[in-house]
Image: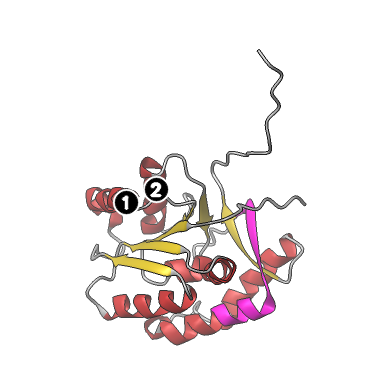
Amino acid sequence: MIGLGAGRLDRIAAVGAHCDDIAIGAGGTLLTLCAAHPGIRIDALVLSGGGSAREQEEQAALTVFCPGADLRLTVLKLPDGRMPTHWDEAKAAVEELRGQTDPDLILAPRTDDAHQDHRGLARLIPTAFRDHLVLGYEIVKWDGDLGRPAAYQPLSPKTAEHKVRLLQEHYPSQRHRPWYDREAFLGLARIRGIECHARYAEAFAVTKLTLDLGTLDLGD
């Protein structure tokens, strides 16, 4: 298995349709990134939950999921489950984010996610970020839409456990959901870890990737 590192990361963007999407899909990766790149700038955009207790949860959660980072979070008020009918507003928000940052990496939902809000946001990202590496995170759900990811971020057992603990602590509004528990989060992380020869991992879809493995100049 070949591992490709991105080198120094100065800026990343993280987007979610709902409060908690980013943390569920890429919380361990954020913890790992922030430990490896102190002071990294993280521009986070969430399309729904603005002005509610969910926004307060998201602000508190992402603050601890991004320790030491320059976190800039925007939470909008698009209605949950209705993103296809608010396409113009969502597109304007993504384009505004693009005007604020030129990230080295983007964490976003997968384009084949079964949830219409996740899928719609994922399909908007490349319309504004055309030359950027986008990692599509996965969120376990009853739809059974998990696929075969192309990229993995291994997580140490400590990081995987820390992610689960933070999810439980900072999103009390979600604890009643039958899928929102330690077994679900660690179980998926364990499976993805097996797939990349690690104990735990988060996995991502990659729709387009440009390699820079060196050049050979043979002259004119």
- Which secondary structure lies at badge 1? helix
Q: Amino acid at mark 2?
A: Ile
Q: Can you give x and y, in whole percent of width and height, for residue 61 in the image?
A: 42, 78
Q: Can you give x and y, in whole percent of width and height, for residue 208 in the image?
A: 54, 41
Cα–Cα span, label 2 and label 1: 7 Å
Tell me which numbered mark, 2 or 1, is placed earlier along the sequence: 1
**Residue occupying image coordinates x 54% and y 84%:** 165
Q: Can you give x and y, in whole percent of width and height, for residue 79 in the image?
A: 25, 64
**Residue occupying image coordinates x 42% and y 40%:** 130
- Report whether 95 appears left or right of 172: left
Instruction: Please say if 163 is above or below 201.
Output: below
Q: Can you give x and y, in whole percent of width and height, for residue 191 in the image?
A: 69, 67
Say few, some or many: other residues with alpha carbon within 10 Å of mark 1 (under 14 / 14 to 19 / 20 or more).
many
Is 77 part of what is drawn in magenta? no
Extent of the magenta region: 147-163
**Residue occupying image coordinates x 35% and y 66%:** 72
Mark 2–mark 1 CB contact (< 8 Å): yes
Say few, some or many: other residues with alpha carbon within 10 Å of mark 2 (under 14 / 14 to 19 / 20 or more).
many
The residue under label 1 is: 94
Looking at this view, is 137 or 75 the one in front?
75
The residue under label 2 is: 125
Please indicate, yes or no, whether residue 140 appears anywhere in the rendered image.
no
Looking at this view, is 190 or 32 the one in front?
32
Q: Quadrant of residue 184?
A: bottom right
Q: Amino acid at mark 1?
A: Val
